Amino acid sequence: MVSSVGQHFLLKLFLLSFKLRLITDRLGNSLREPKASLDPSTFQQKWRQLPISISQEYSLSSEGVRALTTPQTLPRHMQNSSIHCIASGGQSPNLKFFFYAQKAEESSTFLVECLINTSSSKAQIKIKADDQTASQQFSSLFQTALSNFGS
Ligand SMILES: *[C@@H]1O[C@H](CO)[C@@H](O)[C@H](O)[C@H]1NC(C)=O
Ligand SMILES: *[C@@H]1O[C@H](CO)[C@@H](O)[C@H](O)[C@H]1NC(C)=O
């Protein structure tokens, strides 16, 4: 299900060089190095310039919340839907992740800030996009991937 949605949407990874320090300095406290690769200054620049196109709250499954006792399981899970983690941090119950994805056939990038409260089992998502018209489609993909987390 997840991979067919992923294939349908044709997302792919940026293959750019990566220095996490830049993004941790600008994007906030206690962010940690993930296994994805993206030029953090590009991420930062886009995050500053683009408006929020979608802001939503999702509920996490109890399996998802349990899986977050090891926070790095979420980046690995989202990676399977071609959604890559560029930075993560925080401490339970409040975890913070930044994700990005790109449509394969265009240079259209999606940026996501995902704040998770494991006490309330809620995820607060902010999505920014080069192509605002594709935000809703990306948001559905993101939500599907998130709802499968832990299962
Ligand atoms: C990602 O997908 C692969 C192949 O479909 C699967 O073997 C693996 O368990 C998946 N990993 C996660 C974290 O979902
Ligand atoms: C997280 O959820 C708990 C329980 O609902 C709540 O008391 C707390 O204020 C929330 N934390 C944040 C940062 O929203």
Image (cartoon, helix red, strand yellow):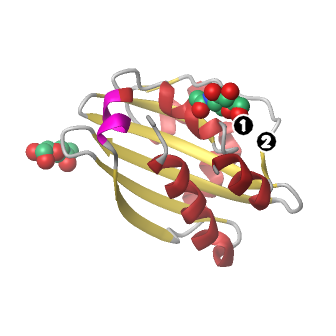
The percent position of residue 133, horizontal first and vertical second, equals: 66, 78
Classify residue 64 by image quadrant.
top left
- Would you place residue 40 above or below residue 54 in this image? above
Looking at this view, is 51 or 88 the one in front? 88
Residue at the image position 55 percent from the left and 63 percent from the top: 139
Mark 2–mark 1 contact, CB under 8 Å? yes
* Residue stretch rendered in magenta on the structure: 62-66
Q: Which mark is residue 85?
A: none
In the rendered image, the quadrant that contains the C terminus is top left
Q: Which mark is residue 38?
A: 1
Circle 2 crowding by C-alpha within 10 Å: few under 14, some 14–19, many from 20: some
Classify residue 128 by image quadrant.
bottom right
Residue at the image position 79 percent from the left and 29 percent from the top: 17
Q: Amino acid at mark 2?
A: Phe
**Visible residue check, residue 133:** yes
Residue 97 located within the stretch drawn in magenta = no
Q: Is residue 141 left or right of residue 130?
A: left
Q: Please give the residue where the numbered disc 2 appears in the rendered image.
A: 14
